Image (cartoon, rainbow, N blue to C red):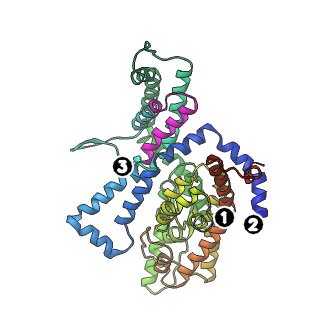
Amino acid sequence: MKKLEAFMEKHLMPYAVKIGSIKGLIAIRDGVALAMPLIIIGSVFLIIGSFPIEEWTNFIGGLMDGRISAALTHATNSSFGIMGLVGAFGIARSMAEQYNVDGASAGVISVSAWLILTPNIVSDLGEGVPVTYLGSRGLFIAILVGLLSAWVFQWFVNRNIVIKMPEGVPPAVSKSFVALIPGAIILLVAIAASLIIETFFDNAHELLATVLAGPLGILGGSLFGAILTVFLNSAFWFMGIHGGNIVGSVTGPIFLANTDANRLALQAGEPLPEIFTSQFFDLFAYLGGGGAVMGLAFAILFFGKSAQSKAMKGVGVVPNLFNISEPLMFGMPIMFNMLYLIPFVIAPVVNVIITYFAMVTGLLSRTIGIAVPWTTPPIISGWLATGDWTGPLWQIILLVVDMLIYLPFFLMSDKRQLVTEQVASGNDTTEESSVEK
């Protein structure tokens, strides 16, 4: 393990550091981090409202004629579910501040441009923005709009193509006038882009989904298709795109049909025909969520030494036991973090391959077609999905395998973070020099 860690520090770390210093990646990291408190709080609401015990959900659903359940859903959508909106502001603000211009103005303009590219819902109650696009599904467009808006904003400001107010004008008023020209240009471009896009698609978000999902239609129920499915899911998530929405929109019906085929075979007393079902992916391939991050969660739990890792043991690991990966994914962060790209992609691919051969050889029972709630923790979900002890046992094996895949990358990242914290607190150690080398 130490030799592997030393090899990665020597050959991988320098490139990761260079890539991590790119302004755009820093902006994405800081912008998404702005939504972390909401993601963590929203995860609690989500667990309470969707706890995988039928008696509990029935109890919550019956309180005050369903108003408590509705309130929890609304709270989740209003916290966890607005990371795209917050990201549009935070990413633009961080990007602008790296160019030494007013980040708050750039962030506000970015939010407006993002909303222009997001459709409105018109009903008898009035107009509104669909909750669907406020969260992770709208995050990729938020990333693009945030980066482009901030770059255009700083281009005008740094070239003094702005309206300047006389000295003595309050700073808040002066900054508002500085933002007028670049803000007007950015919003006009957003309007033009929206009109062009809506000529062919419903909106920019649907354009993205269509462009990315089209090539996925070639996937079927083969091992190659399953590997490509999880690979693309991880790749999209890593770039800030909700992989489940993009990949699942195409592959979901295929694997759902396979799930029902197994259910019908079970009812008829026949052998289960399908391996690649919805439960295969939800409960085995994506153990802990996209990227099979439960392996990382347990690496943090057992081996984390930095203050960041210790903090993530509670706010990231506990929700991940219920397959809620966002606190961990955005808290470490994993997204756009080159140190975690390899394990984030490899872990679910390995899960697919070894689980496939385990089912083919009979070591693991195939899923029986029961719709297990996605928030059901491992062990319980494995037993429910397969109907016997091989399910939970295999989940434990996968968890160990995933943790070993993530471990060397996590140790390298945690060591680097620990040195950074020691330097920040004034407790510099000789270890710092070894990491820098």
What is the C-alpha distance between the residues marked 1 and 3? 36 Å
How many C-alpha atoms fall within 10 Å of the one at disc 1: few (<14), some, or many (≥20)? many
Residue 65's x, y, as percent?
A: 20, 65
User: Can residue 365 be seen from the camera position used here?
Assistant: no
Comparing marks 1 and 3, which lies closer to the viewer? 1
Q: Is residue 152 magenta?
A: no
Residue type, numbered disc 1: Leu
**Extreme bottom residue here?**
269
- Residue 135 against residue 27 in the figure, above or below: below
Give the labeled residue for mark 1. Answer: 407
Give the labeled residue for mark 3. Answer: 131
Q: Is residue 410 left or right of residue 62?
A: right
What is the C-alpha distance between the residues marked 2 and 1? 9 Å
Residue type, numbered disc 2: Met
| CB within 8 Å, label 1 to label 3 | no
**Which residue sits at x=62%, y=61%?**
305
The numbered mark at residue 1 is 2
Front residue of this view, candidates 32 and 65: 32
**Extreme front residue here?**
426
